[in-house]
Amino acid sequence: MAGETEKIENSDASENPTVNIEDIVYIGQNAPTEIVSDDVKGLDANRYATKKTVAQGMLDIALLTSNASQLKYVLQVGPKHEFYTLLVVLISISIVLQLLIGLLFVIIGGLDLNDHEDQPSALVLNDVIVIFIFVISVINIVISAFGIEYSNSPLVLERLKYINSEYLKKGNFTGV
């Protein structure tokens, strides 16, 4: 089959040519990648990569916002929190890694995926980003496991204790 020329046989001499499907499949499999990818309409690797990078960036911003909120909560509660040091360290590492990933997104967004010289760099950067995202995910699972609550009740209780102690200091209590 490899030495055969590409031709359409006309078996019954009519206007409807017959085509051997196996020949078409064989020819398509041996076609160079550039020819096959050029024939695909609407497939632009740079556009896809840009959309993917923007989507990942938006998710990164959402996680960064969440981590900032968690850090604020832990810092407000202070060392009274059972896992204060651990949570501050983990949340800080998560935020630093997210900022680093944001920088890598900017770098990878500037690469031209159609340029063969940029492709190895893009692959390495993409792998590094995937590893960092995995590490951030694990860190945030650990953060969630150690009890960041979005309730201000510990702060409210501390504030009530403070108000109560100030009230009692002034002698404003009833001797019931």
Image (spheres, rainbow, N blue to C red):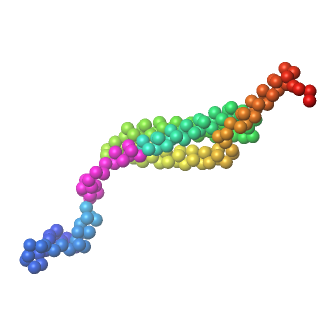
Q: Residue at x 57, y 44 (%)?
A: 136
Q: Is residue 137 left or right of residue 105?
A: right
Assess whether residue 72 is covered by the magenta stretch.
no
Vertical side of 31 occupied by 76: above or below? above
Q: Is residue 112 left or right of residue 136?
A: left
- Comparing 33 with 83, the one in front is 83
Vertical side of 168 occupied by 30: above or below? below
Q: Which percent across, then down, holds residue 166?
A: 81, 23
- Comparing 26 with 157, the one in front is 157
Q: Residue at x 52, y 40 (%)?
A: 62
Q: Which residues are magenta?
A: 32-52
State how many labels appear. 0
Q: Main secondary structure of the magenta part?
A: helix
- Comparing 142 with 107, the one in front is 142
Q: Is residue 3 left or right of residue 61?
A: left
Image quadrant assignment for residue 5: bottom left
Q: Residue at x 81, y 28 (%)?
A: 164
Q: Residue furthest top?
A: 170
- Asked if residue 55 shows in the view, the reply is yes
Q: Which percent across, then down, holds residue 108?
A: 41, 41
- Asked if residue 92 shows in the view, the reply is no
Q: Which percent across, then down, holds residue 150?
A: 65, 40
